[in-house]
Amino acid sequence: MQNIRHDVKGNILHIEVDLSKEIGLSQSGKSMLIATSGGGVAVSSEKPDTRFNVSVYKKR
């Protein structure tokens, strides 16, 4: 994961992204990536079968 923090409180998943950061261009070069989970990520060790996938980007 890049520029993403997550936490589970009870049954609520909290995802935090710093929107002021840029981590590089998308593969097409059309967008600037701000954050990515890099694929499906387990929500927690207690819920390994529950996953999330996040991409945050903006146009160049």
Image: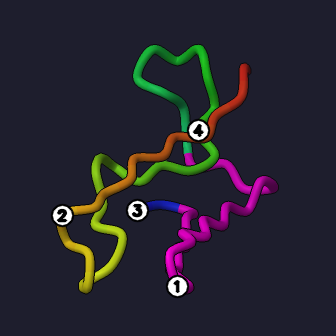
Image: magenta residue range: 3-23
Q: Label 2 crowding class (10 Å Cα cut-off): few <14, some 14-19, many 20+?
A: few
Ranked by sequence position, the earlier of labels 3 and 1 is 3
Residue found at x 54% / y 69% = 13
Q: Which residue is mark 1?
A: 10
Q: Which residue is mark 2?
A: 49
Circle 4 sits in a helix, a strand or a loop, which is it?
strand
**Gap between marks 1 and 2, in whole Å?**
16 Å
Q: Label 3 sits on what residue type?
A: Met
Asked if residue 16 lies left or right of residue 51, the reply is: right
Which sits in the foreground, 47 or 52? 47
Q: Which residue is mark 4?
A: 33
Ranked by sequence position, the earlier of labels 4 and 3 is 3
**Gap between marks 4 and 2, in whole Å?**
27 Å
Q: Label 4 sits on what residue type?
A: Leu
Ranked by sequence position, the earlier of labels 1 and 2 is 1
Q: Are dots 3 and 1 in contact, CB under 8 Å?
A: no
Q: Position of residue 46 (x, y in %)?
A: 26, 85
Q: Label 4 crowding class (10 Å Cα cut-off): few <14, some 14-19, many 20+?
A: many
Q: Label 2 sits on what residue type?
A: Asp
- Above or below residue 26? Residue 19 is below
Asked if residue 43 lies left or right of residue 55, the reply is: left
**Gap between marks 2 and 3, in whole Å?**
18 Å
Q: Which residue is mark 3?
A: 1
- The mark lying in front, picked from 2 and 3, is 2
Which quarter of the figure has residue 14?
bottom right
- The mark lying in front, picked from 3 and 1, is 1
Circle 3 sits in a helix, a strand or a loop, which is it?
loop
Circle 1 sits in a helix, a strand or a loop, which is it?
loop
